[in-house]
Image: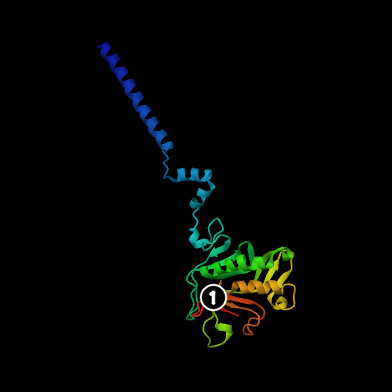
């Protein structure tokens, strides 16, 4: 009987130890959850190790809504910087932009104000700066650093004439440039330097380069309405680009 009692005591002790060990294991499992690649904890660790991946885990709105790609590409054009903005609607028939962007820099050249337009017009502006403005300016004044924007999106009739058709400005397809800003603080003014100036040749050269890049190219001497600025838009004309 004594041996049986001793054996029972030993079995009870071993059972109690096992239960205690199981409870300890349960507490450890709750305290240290298993982290898989799909859990937020794992993603947070990876994102801290990889700054590029971290962008996806900050609760930000997708880039397609807020602005350009991290590389500085807007409308898929390298060097075109700015932001994507919500569609522009208007109670005026013909005005508005379905997919507008606000452009701030074009191939390293800063605009005097963020200019609203569609991507086709933004891409044309980029080509003009690269192929027209920069080659024409060269090293004069240390090179081009900015463009003075006289007008961009605005819902109005052509040439501000009542009853006229909606301007391409009202469709987000136009931009007006009044001066080229240079690194030394000087500028090439369309109004002041078009004639009899050391900058006349450069202004005329870059204006000619806009023909074909844009659908419409207007400047001093075109129609009396553009004596102090270049008007460029991406309207399509039956007989090809309209350049004056």
Report which residue position mark 1 lands on. 215
Between 108 and 36, the one nearer to me in the picture: 108
Quarter of the view holding residue 26: top left
Question: Which of 157 and 206 lies nearest the eye of the viewer?
Answer: 206
In the rendered image, the residue lying farthest to the top is 2
Q: How many marks?
A: 1
The reply to whether residue 149 is visible in this rendering is: no
Image quarter in which the N terminus is found: top left
How is this picture coloured? rainbow
Place of residue 123 in the rendered image (x, y in percent of width and height, measured from the top left): 54, 67
Q: Is residue 184 left or right of residue 236?
A: right
Residue at the location (56% across, 67% down)? 102
Residue 213: which quarter of the image? Answer: bottom right
Q: Nearer the viewer, residue 45 or 158?
A: 158
Mark 1 burial class by Cα count in 10 Å: few <14, some 14-19, many 20+: many
Q: Secondary structure at mark 1?
A: loop
Q: Find residue 97 and report its horizontal and vertical position in percent.
A: 49, 73
From the top left corner, tell me how far across and down residue 66 is, in percent.
52, 61
Apparent side of residue 218 relative to residue 96 in the rendered image (left or right): right
Residue 23 in sight: yes
> Is 222 rendered above or below residue 52?
below
The residue shown at (62%, 74%) is 208
Height in image: 200 above or below 104?
Answer: below
Q: Position of residue 142 (x, y in %)?
A: 72, 63
The residue shown at (57%, 87%) is: 161
Image position of 85 with respect to 243: above or below? above
Q: Which residue occupies 63% across, 61% down?
A: 108
């Amino acid at each position: 009987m004594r041996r049986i009692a001793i054996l029972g005591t030993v079995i009870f002790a071993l059972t109690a130890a096992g239960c205690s060990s199981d409870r300890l294991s349960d507490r450890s499992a709750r305290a240290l959850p298993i982290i898989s690649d799909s859990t937020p904890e794992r993603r947070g660790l990876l994102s801290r190790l990889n700054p590029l991946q971290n962008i996806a885990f900050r609760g930000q709105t997708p880039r397609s809504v807020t602005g350009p790609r991290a590389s500085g590409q807007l409308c898929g054009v390298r060097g075109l910087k700015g932001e994507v903005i919500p569609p522009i609607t208007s109670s005026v028939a013909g005005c508005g932009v379905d997919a507008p962007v606000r452009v701030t820099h074009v191939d390293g050249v800063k605009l005097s104000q963020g200019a609203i337009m569609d991507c086709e017009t933004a891409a044309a502006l980029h080509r003009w700066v690269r192929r027209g403005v920069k080659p024409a300016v060269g090293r004069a004044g240390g090179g081009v650093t900015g463009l003075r924007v006289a007008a961009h999106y605005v819902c109005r009739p052509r040439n501000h004439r009542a009853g006229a058709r909606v301007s391409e400005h009202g469709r987000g397809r136009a931009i007006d440039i009044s001066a080229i800003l240079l690194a030394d603080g000087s500028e090439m003014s369309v109004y002041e330097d078009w004639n009899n100036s050391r900058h006349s040749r450069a202004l005329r050269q870059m204006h000619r380069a806009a023909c074909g890049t844009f659908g419409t190219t207007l400047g001093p001497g075109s129609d009396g309405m553009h004596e102090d600025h270049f008007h460029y838009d991406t309207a399509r004309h039956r007989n090809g680009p309209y350049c004056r």
